[in-house]
Amino acid sequence: MIPAEFSALLTRFMVIAGAKNWKKRFESFDTQIKSNPFYEEYIVDRFPLEISLQDFLSWRKSTGRNYRVPIDADEAALFGFIGMTSRIHQRLSSQGKVRLEGAIRDALKNDSGLAPVAFEFVVAAHLMHRGFSVEFVDLEGTEKFDLLCERDGSFLEVECKNLSGDAGRPIHRKRLVQLGAAIQNIVGEDRKREAGIELVKVTLEKRLEGRTEHQLSIANAVAESLRTQTGSSGVDGFSVEYRLVGPVECPEIPTIINPESVSGLRSAVESLAETQNANIVFNITPGHGVTAVVVDSQADTRIMDYLAERTKEAASDQLSGLRSGMVCVRFVDMSDQQLHEIAEVEKSTNLSALQHLASDLLSREDWSHIHKFAFFARGDANVGIHQSSVIGDFSSTTGGSVYHFKNKGVKYTDFSGYSIF
């Protein structure tokens, strides 16, 4: 993409969304971070396209330049999204243009952000690279599903679903952020911290709630545990355990706090807490000590139930059943490792949890129109491929992973001569 072309695409993109809407979005981020510093990591991770645009526009204003080679993967994804949005907007009908503009404006107001729109465009771009022509039929208002793809006279309906990694989990990340602020407000930043790692493990009987009373009850219990260096079994539906790992036994506390050093601390705390993918609130004194509050729940994680529900909705309510169809589902904040755990690591003797789900869905007699289910980690769907040793193909991409499962009994075109992923 040459600088002049990018400048024109960016100008059109800003008009599509409305510069005022972008300004309000950026101001809302700043307000949330000022009110609760724990929001910064959440916002940066949850809204990478929006944050990358904010950073780029700030750079453009300070330098007077209109283009640079993308500085990281998020900015590269942003530039691709700007190009796709601008070009797609040009080719839509008047009604389609209005619907796309509305979708972008709505995305700048809600908790999902641009991720659902971007995912649809990434899948569309991937299929175009595979030789399909793509029509954005949902934007045009002619079909319930997102994309109608055609190649050599064969048609494929595609529905894209973008789900939060919180789906089906008893502890949602946004509520954990709110709890972190509540703990900090009560404990205080000027507390004399012990050297080493102070590990406070909170185990909930049920879900982490958003109610202020619930959060304050936990925060007060954590503060008391830190003060007395003891645990407790509360009557409010949770228990607290305290453990101090002194400077001799614990890993070195970093003097510089950055994503890499925090990632190292996370691994150390997870090892101490004997858990993986833990929900952790950190408070760090560089080079001296770390307070890590690990929040867990005894309630079952129902990721697969939620995934099955949303996949069924897409297959039954969006796809027409008159042509071959594909359902693409992406967890916006699920890492490769987390997707891998439900796809392969947790597999029993024969099938993984994800394979069980795909097998159950594809065995339905009323879904013989389904050609394929595809499940994505965050990232795009475009690059290298290899055949997995387990049922279902596995494609590794530059920004994420996708596990896809083909229906061998599809009654329409099976696209056996084409490589979709």
Image (cartoon, rainbow, N blue to C red):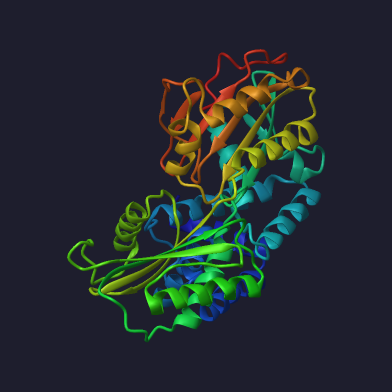
Closest to the observer: 228 or 366?
228
Q: Quadrant of residue 235?
A: bottom right
Q: Is residue 179 left or right of residue 361?
A: left
Res 282 visible: yes
Point out residue 49 in the picture as x, y percentages from the top left corner: 52, 58
What count of labels does the image hold? 0
Q: Residue at x 46, y 38 (%)?
A: 341
Q: Nearer the viewer, residue 412 or 164?
A: 164
User: In the rendered view, does 363 fall on the left or right side of 75?
Assistant: right
Residue at 20% over, 68% down? 247
Counting from the top left corner in percent of width and height, residue 87 is at: 61, 48
Quarter of the image for residue 50 reads bottom right
Q: Residue at x 57, y 24 (%)?
A: 405
Q: Residue 123 location, x and y as percent?
A: 58, 38
Q: Quadrant of residue 113?
A: bottom right
Q: Nearer the viewer, residue 45 or 2?
A: 45
The furthest residue to the bottom: 190
Q: Position of residue 306 (x, y in %)?
A: 66, 42
Please say whether residue 130 is visible from this viewpoint.
no
Q: Does 346 appear above or below 219?
A: above
Residue toward you, 13 or 186: 186
Say which residue appears at 46% left-offset and 43% top-offset.
Answer: 338
347 relative to 340, above or below: above
